[in-house]
Image: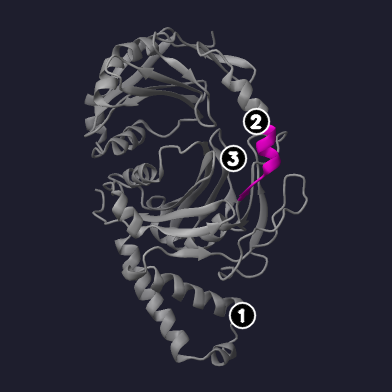
Amino acid sequence: MARNVEPLAIHASRSTKRGTRVAAVLKNYPPFQIARWGLPAAAFATLATLAAIDLSGCKKEEGIIVYRVSKAAPETTASGSAAPEAPEASAMPSMSAPGDQSAQAVAPATADQPAQVTGSAPADWLPQPLSAMRQASYVVKGDNGASADISLVILDGPAGGTLDNVNRWLSQLGQAGMDQDKLSKTAQHVAAPLGDVTLVDLEGLPSGGDATKDGRIVGGIVTTADRTVFFKMHGNAALTESQKVPFIQWVASVRLDPSAAAAAAPAAAQSAAIPPAIAPSGNNAQIQWQVPDGWKSAPATSMRYATFNTSGQTGAAADVSVVMLDGEGGGDLQNVNRWRGQLGLDPVTDEDLKSLVVPVKAKDGGLLTVDMSGPTSRLLAGWTRVDGKSWFFKLTGPESAAGAEKEKFIKFLESIQFHP
């Protein structure tokens, strides 16, 4: 069963108690007496930082909290040279002893491309293989099999907005979404080289979830002039709690590599010029389809394999996306519940899913599809897995627009052919 947890409420209560205890130590024992205990200066500074974070985070009258994080060790770029110092630095000490913070360049998807981001990750964060979406990927492990997954994803444009993405994370935890007013009251902020990062701390265990690797998400979102950057730590609740400050320090250390952005521009322009009927990946076409009348191709993005815009007789528009991910791309139930969360719908069980899924036969295989409507929008989705990759086809828009395009969307799915 999903735990009925109000996001951030338990964390706030627990943080208040811990912050009060730390503050009491600092109040009752002067610095010179604490020094006699043999604590290094960094540890004393850490006590002060934790007290400031935990206590200030629960003062309603103070509103938004801004973290300004101290500099970690100088990052190195893919070439091995030192990266320039971050413009933001001060006030939050390192949470680990000297040598525990490893300066790492965030590796690109392929070795012959320049790194797109650089940042300093703690030494106990173990690097994981990157994917088509992830610019950085780590796992941290705790006691009794506990683990947490850490990722950095960069998408073009606003990528749905902060509120919708926070509600997507809540749906992954089996929790109800929040409105903008509640987000404004509960979100914290981190001053980082990339800009003002909105930080949320969400808690809840979805039905059937594994508490050793699920139960809490600490996430950060920052939107620049042309892209959105997502920082996410998702894992065991207690372990995620213990890694929150190192996570914030990492967020505050990450910066984009301008040379990588410049190098990527010609590739993006070339991708946008690809005819929509055959969308290649790399140098070879992996899939072919027939584009329905009235669908207009839009430039591909770092996440989307292809994008189409529709405009029906009602004047309302719908968005069609094609996304390819390596591996399983998450389970069917998890993906459907994520989409339901985007629509403002409650999650379903495995048994419920069976009645929602409708198979569709394509030219050389089959796809599974769902058709779901929320209070303000409707979503049609189809997916399949071929040659170790997961393909997702999704149409979203107002009820009138999605309903008018459903027949075309189904025909689009039926026309799909892999390795033409």
Q: Nearer the viewer, mark 3 or mark 2?
A: 2
Secondary structure under tag 2 reads helix
Crowd band around label 3 with a 10 angstrom C-alpha radius: few (<14), some (14–19), many (20+) = few
* Label 1 close to label 2 by CB (< 8 Å): no
Crowd band around label 1 with a 10 angstrom C-alpha radius: few (<14), some (14–19), many (20+) = few
Residue at the location (50% across, 64% down)?
Answer: 67
Viewer-nearest residue: 173 or 124? 173
What type is the residue that disc 3 sits on? Pro
On screen, residue 245 above or below 125: below
What residue is disc 2 on?
A: 265
Q: Quadrant of residue 182?
A: bottom left
Q: Nearer the viewer, mark 1 or mark 3?
A: 1
Where residue 208 appears, x then y in whole percent? Answer: 30, 44
Q: Earlier in the sequence, mark 1 or mark 3?
A: 1
What residue is disc 1 on?
A: 41
Range of magenta residues: 255-265
Residue 129's tag is 3
Q: Earlier in the sequence, mark 1 or mark 2?
A: 1
Q: Earlier in the sequence, mark 3 or mark 2?
A: 3
Q: Quadrant of the C terminus?
A: top right
Q: CA distance from mark 1 to mark 2?
A: 46 Å
Residue at the location (35% across, 73% down)?
Answer: 16
